[in-house]
Amino acid sequence: MLRRKKKKLDENSDGPGRLNILVRIGVVLVTATAVVSGMFVGLKYLEQTVLARKVDQPAATTVRVAFGVPAWMPQSLAEEIGKSLILPRAAFYDAELTADTYARARANPWIREVRCVTKKRTTDDRIALVEIDCEFRMAVARVPIGKESAREFAYVDSEGVRLPAKDVPQWMLEMSGDAKGPGTRSKPISFRDSDLPPAGAAVKALHYITIAGVESAPPAIGQPWSGGDIREGLRLVNLVLTHSVSTYANQIARVDVRNFDGRISKREPYLRMYAQVDDGPATDIKFGRFEVPGGGDFEISAEQKMSTLDQFFITNGNKLAGGASSCDLRYGDLLYTPS
């Protein structure tokens, strides 16, 4: 009787063996869960560590900006532009670094166009570069502003955009070949008024053609100057500066646009230039106006007028200023009045 009950008890219960198996399975599951959790926490920690290193690394890295410096630009101006394009605490791994640099470059009045901004490491781990592919604006003319008693000048590029006057190159130093080694060509070095040329260096003033008679008010720095008179004046300045016989560009003291579109007199030249060197005698060069594009205009072409001016330059002993009180370019033939 007792044996039968014991046997029945053994058949209806799991017994110690089954209980041990369940315990072991439970321990394995708990252990596996702990291992997976530990791996997840470990991976997150590793990820945070890597990201922290990326964020911290630029603190010991100098981020510099690099761009092609035009030959006309003073080195001091190039350095200031470069510093203004990078935040003082710039981080190389900052996702907004190139976008921020691009925005700063676009807003700089000296930069006409930004083509591309990239960043890269250098061979020196302490230095990283942000490279900017851009085009700069160059001052080509100046416009008198302010009262006659306190005359100042606003400087513009070929498109009429006003540039910071304090940063416009004003002086040039011509390096001799001996200073750079035999067989090398001299390269001009320009300076702003605030720059200090080398001690004892001989510098000469840079020449900017003055556009006189502009009626519209000057724009803000970095903005284009509105008005047809300054646009036509700049068109004539650019024509002179890019003409094949460019040796006389420095003799053109000013372009006069007071009679633009015949607003003073339809009989007088709409545009005229005055050639003068220092305080010497001036020559009135009557240009007229630019021809209407597409043909059908009685006005002769600007190319013909510049060819006539070339002829006058040669006839007058390779000079524009002096030797004649006036030179009229409007009729295709060389017409001038001797002094």
Image: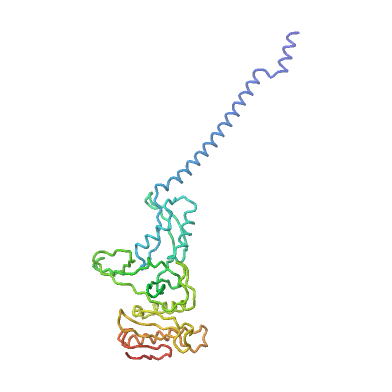
Task: Please name the residue shown 58% across and 32% down the image.
Answer: 33
Q: Is residue 44 left or right of residue 268?
A: right
Q: Position of residue 281 (x, y in %)?
A: 31, 84
Residue sitting at the far top: 1
Name which quarter of the figure residue 38 lies in: top right
Q: Quadrant of the N terminus?
A: top right
Residue sitting at the far front: 149
Q: Does 171 sit above or below residue 312?
A: above
Task: Please name the residue shown 45% across and 70% down the image.
Answer: 161
Of residue 41 and residue 229, the one placed in the foreground of this image is 229
Name which quarter of the figure residue 147 lies in: bottom left
Q: Is residue 50 left or right of residue 77?
A: right
Q: Position of residue 330 (x, y in %)?
A: 43, 88
Q: Position of residue 300 (x, y in %)?
A: 46, 88
How many marks overall? 0
Of residue 129 and residue 240, the one placed in the foreground of this image is 240
Q: How is the image coloured?
A: rainbow
